[in-house]
Image (cartoon, rainbow, N blue to C red):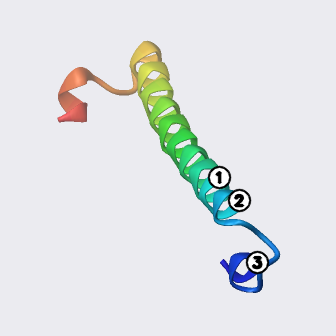
Amino acid sequence: MEGYKSGLKSILDVLEAQSQLQEARTKLVESQKDLFVSSADLARAMGTISVKDLG
C-alpha cells in the first residue's frame, strides 16, 4: 500500500499483488492438506495407524 499511497503504484498493481498473495495462501493450505493426507496414508499402509485412530 505504501507504493500506492506515494503514487509509485496504481490501484491495479495493489489489487494484483493482493490476488497473488491470496493465491499463494490458498496453495499453501492445499499443500499442507496434501501433506497431512499423504502422511496418514503412509502410516496406514505401514500399519502404524488405523482408520479408528483418525477419529
Where does the N terminus fall, quadrant-wise? bottom right
Amino acid at dot 2: Asp
Q: Give the CA distance from mark 3 to mark 2.
A: 9 Å
Determine which residue is flagged by label 1.
Answer: 16
* Quadrant hosting residue 49: top left
Type of amino acid under label 1: Glu
Residue positioned 72% across, 66% down in the render: 10
Residue 14 screen position, x and y as percent: 65, 64
In the image, 2 versus 55, the foreground residue is 2
Q: Residue 4, relative to residue 18: is it above or below?
A: below
Dot 2: few (<14), some (14–19), or many (≥20) neighbours within 10 Å?
some
Indicate the position of residue 36 as horizontal and vertical percent values: 45, 35
Indicate left or right for 48 with 11 as reference.
left
> In front here: 29 or 40?
29
- Labels 3 and 1: the sequence-earlier one: 3
**Residue 11 lies in quadrant:** bottom right
Q: Quadrant of the C terminus?
A: top left
According to the picture, the residue beneath numbered tag 3 turns out to be: 3
Near mark 1 (Cα within 10 A), the count class, few <14, some 14-19 or many ≥20, is few
Could you tell me how far apart the alpha carbons at marks 3 and 1 are, in whole angstroms? 13 Å
Pointers 2 and 1 in contact (CB under 8 A)? yes
On residue 5, which mark appears? none
Instruction: Pick whichever, 35 or 9, lies toward us.
Output: 9
Classify mark 3: helix, strand or loop. Answer: helix
In the picture, measured across the screen, residue 32 lies left or right of residue 6, that is left
Do labels 3 and 1 touch, CB within 8 Å? Answer: no
Residue 51: x, y in percent?
23, 22
* Helix, strand or loop status at disc 1: helix
Amino acid type assigned to the residue bearing label 3 in the image: Gly
Q: Which mark is residue 13?
A: 2
Look at the picture and state if 49 lies above or below 46: below
